[in-house]
Image (tube, rainbow, N blue to C red):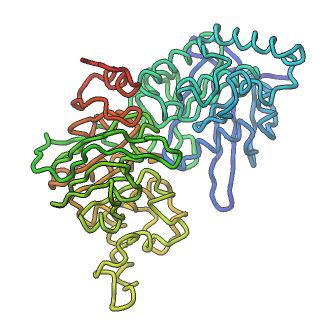
Amino acid sequence: MNKALHTNELGTSAVPAIELRKINKRFGPVHANKDIDLVVAKGSIHGIIGENGAGKSTLMSILYGFYEADEGDILVNGSPVRISDSKTAIALGIGMVHQHFMLVDNFSVLENVILGAEDSGFLASGISRARTELKRLEDEYELRVDPDALIQDLPVGLQQRVEILKALYRGADVLILDEPTGVLTPAEADHLFKILNVLKDQGKTVLLITHKLREIMAITDKVSVMRRGEMVATRQTAETNMSELAELMVGRSVLLNVEKQPAKPRDTVLAVEGLTVTDTRGVETVKNVSLEVKAGEIVGIAGVSGNGQTELLETIAGIRSATSGTLHIAGETIDLGTRTPNPAEMRQKSLGHVPEDRHRMGLVTRFAEYENAILGYHNDPQYSNGLFLDIAGIKAAAMAEIEKYDIRPPNPILKTANFSGGNQQKIVLAREIERDPTVLLVGQPTRGVDIGAIEFIHKRLIEMRDAGKGILLVSVELDEIRALADRVLVMFDGRIVGERAPDADERELGLLMAGVEGAGA
């Protein structure tokens, strides 16, 4: 069988690890992948970037066997193959580490690694043989982790190592990683990059899906850019830059750096004292937190997801009850230990809230766009015509927000489920910002949002700050916190463990996020 040869960077011919030719995939009227060509060299780290809906995940799902292409050819090590399911992909040496880990929490590391591979030769000779092989992989690829530790007791960085070990244990030569740093501290991300370089040095091939251009520039050898289902460019990473990649992704020039003047903070508009929150399991998720936000400033809360940030915002917004603590807002002091204000009351105190999970709390996706545009504000006089809602007026107001926030498609009667993630986020932001709140709580403002929408959202938040509003911002993206915030608070294990300026050393902030006491002291 003839094997396709390509010329590598050194000018010699080599068989690619992966080659995709004219891949097409449709979902009804949506043409998700259009004549995609992709060549991935063996022993390289190849980045795949693109906006939401560009077709990246569909393409990788075809390679890993979640979907089959409607048309096109897949070659692995130069040989044509048909990948009908993930089992076939694994047999061909293709592994995938998903953004949301596929691990059993109450199983050990060893049990998770061998789960689903029990019929392999390793287990035929007993569990000790599997343990020996796992030890070899840990040493060879610097992926050390206690094989007897329970997954639920491991930090996310180590859980990710377990996912990589699972793929290597099954013989993966090609490893697909989907947004691998989304839940990692900067230090954990740096360690992951070291691991990826070790994998590359050992001859493994890595396909990296990420929206973080800085990571692309730091770790990849080549980068391919997708836009609207098509492959629009492939570049040697050393021969491109973040500005060019951003323009290729969006189809226009994009401002990557947040432009803002120094903050001019004034009076305190929100203060929290001694806030403690206990969840339904009896676990304290917020522990004696105190903070304040002034008019004309953005206070950012940095931290790895799951350290109390969600509970903090929900409690301030009136969604969750507190065990104890005091809230000062709109000239009133509320003892949260004795009563919980509801969200409607907090809105009346001029507090807006963009929740972290737009699907669970920010939108009713089966409702039309114009209906979501007034959620929580439907009783306002401007939307009521006597006993009934002024539907024509609501639609007109929604259309004005659509135009101002460049929400696409510009159709207020379209079901919100039919908008992309970035446009759904704009719907929520428009609803909250256009009420002109004195205080705005924002959770993960650009989660799952493409680079063009990120630029737009950041500009809007800076405009609010400059208009004298107080903003409390939570994001797991440290770059976003540093770009937007005027003061940075770091949360770990439910506590505020430090306050820093946004230009503080990234390593210092990362150590605080990891719970290292005295970082930078």
Quarter in which the C terminus is drawn? top left
In this picture, residue 87 sits left or right of residue 173: right
Q: Eyeballing the image, is 167 above or below 279?
A: above
Q: Position of residue 274 (x, y in %)?
A: 28, 43
The image quarter containing residue 263 is top left
Q: Work out whether residue 163 or residue 84 is closer to the camera in this orientation and state it.
A: 163
Q: Eyeballing the image, is 502 above or below 248?
A: above
Regarding residue 243, the answer to whether it shows in the image is no
The image quarter containing residue 334 is bottom left
In this picture, residue 363 sits left or right of residue 303: right
Regarding residue 500, the answer to whether it shows in the image is yes
Q: Position of residue 272 (x, y in %)?
A: 25, 47
In this picture, residue 20 sits left or right of residue 306: right
Q: Residue at x 47, y 29 (%)?
A: 184
Q: Work out whether residue 191 or residue 380 is closer to the camera in this orientation and state it.
A: 380
Q: Eyeballing the image, is 318 above or below 34?
A: below
Q: Position of residue 418 (x, y in %)?
A: 54, 63
In this picture, residue 213 sits left or right of residue 438: right
Q: Which residue lies furthest to the front in this view?
A: 338
Q: Residue furthest right?
A: 124
Q: Work out whether residue 448 or residue 515 is closer to the camera in this orientation and state it.
A: 515
Quarter in which the N terminus is drawn? top right
